[in-house]
């Protein structure tokens, strides 16, 4: 998946538009990224990608870029990939 696709996936989870999100977008700036939003994120990481996070990594989620890093570390995000139109 490309970064653009990942941002669309994240935006869908938090009811945001992809254009409003960047890797630097903070958790505090996303209204739906509360405790319930975090549970939704964790469930979606597991169901969509088979990624289960340990508790210490969950606590470190502070911005969109942290989610992108998790996807990249687990081989789900290719920052080199280009979108073909």
Image (cartoon, rainbow, N blue to C red):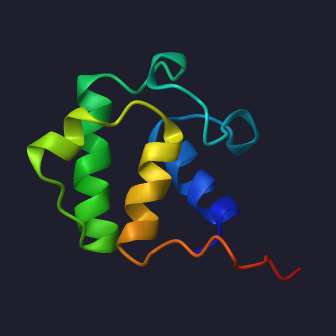
Look at the picture and state if 11 lies above or below 54.
above
Q: Position of residue 5 (x, y in %)?
A: 63, 64
Residue 24: quarter of image: top right
Q: Residue at x 43, y 45 (%)?
A: 66
Farthest residue toward the right?
A: 85
In-front residue for pair 2/39: 2
In-front residue for pair 37/71: 71
Q: Residue at x 47, y 33 (%)?
A: 63
Residue 18: quarter of image: top right
Q: Quadrant of the N terminus?
A: bottom right
Look at the picture and state if 2 lies above or below 6.
below
9 with respect to 22 (left or right): left
81 with respect to 54 (left or right): right
Q: Residue at x 76, y 40 (%)?
A: 19
Q: Position of residue 37 (x, y in %)?
A: 32, 32
Residue 3: quarter of image: bottom right
Q: Residue at x 35, y 73 (%)?
A: 74
Look at the picture and state if 68 lies above or below 63.
below
Q: Position of residue 30 (x, y in %)?
A: 51, 23
Look at the picture and state if 35 lies above or below 42.
above
């Amino acid at each position: 998946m490309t970064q653009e696709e990942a941002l669309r996936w994240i935006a869908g989870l938090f009811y945001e538009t992809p254009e409003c999100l960047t890797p630097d977008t903070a958790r505090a700036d996303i209204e739906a990224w509360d405790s319930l939003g975090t549970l939704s994120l964790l469930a979606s990481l597991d169901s969509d990608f088979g990624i289960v996070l340990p508790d210490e990594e969950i606590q470190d989620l502070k911005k969109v870029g942290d989610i992108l890093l998790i996807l990249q570390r687990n081989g789900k995000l290719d920052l080199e990939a280009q979108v073909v139109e």
